[in-house]
Image (tube, helix red, strand yellow):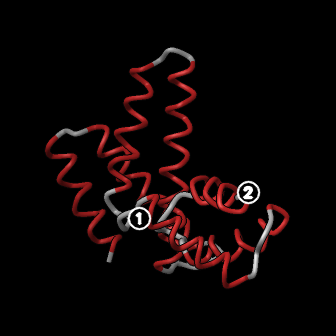
Amino acid sequence: MLEEQINKEIKEAMLAKKASKLEALRAIKSAIILLKTSSEGYSDETEQKSLMKMVKQRKETADVYKTQNRPELADVELAQAAVIEAYLPAQIGENEIKVEIAKIIASVGASSPADMGKVMGVASKQLAGKADGKIISTIVKELLSK
């Protein structure tokens, strides 16, 4: 179970004095505790969504720091994002996403950008945890505008 693994790695990070990794691991542990007490409940799916959200937040924060010319803070956020990403399943490549979305477009009968909502609904469910929503959206727009 992920919680047991995180607890073990928190101890290791404390002993190794790896502050950035420790902070990211504590954030994961906090998210797990919140999920266990939430109305959503704790499952592999909610755990994965939570971790993906954490990675996305850290990457967005790093982008803000970069635009504010604060690379030292951006590096901290990106390092934490990398630690959290290690607990997520591997993301699929852009070409694989295009193939999957093309199949979805054919299955729902989408033919124009007006059908984007139909395609995104199915694509978001099928590719949850495997690809970032922003990338999915970009590819759907690209394929529907052809």
Q: In the image, is 95 to the left or to the right of 128?
A: left
Instruction: Compare residues 35 and 139 and report the one nearer the observer.
Output: 139
Across and down, in percent, residue 145 comes to 73, 57
Q: In the image, is 89 to the left or to the right of 127?
A: left
Q: Please tell me which residue is depicted at 38% across the width and 29% down the height of the picture.
A: 75
Q: Please tell me which residue is depicted at 22% across the width and 39% down the height of the picture.
A: 18
Query: Local crowd at mark 2 within 10 Å, few (<14), some, or many (≥20)?
Result: few
Note whether 143 is above or below 63 in the view shown: below
Across and down, in percent, residue 130 comes to 46, 67
Q: Please tell me which residue is depicted at 21% across the width and 48% down the height of the picture.
A: 13
- The tag earlier along the polypeptide, 2 or 1, is 1
Tell me the kind of residue under disc 2.
Answer: Ser
| SS for dot 2 | loop
Instruction: Compare residues 74 and 35 and report the one nearer the observer.
Output: 74
The span from disc 2 to disc 1 (Cα, nearest Å) is: 23 Å
Quarter of image, res 142: bottom right
The residue wearing badge 2 is 145
Quarter of image, res 10: bottom left
Say the numbered circle drawn on residue 92.
1
Instruction: Compare residues 98 and 29 and report the one nearer the observer.
Output: 98
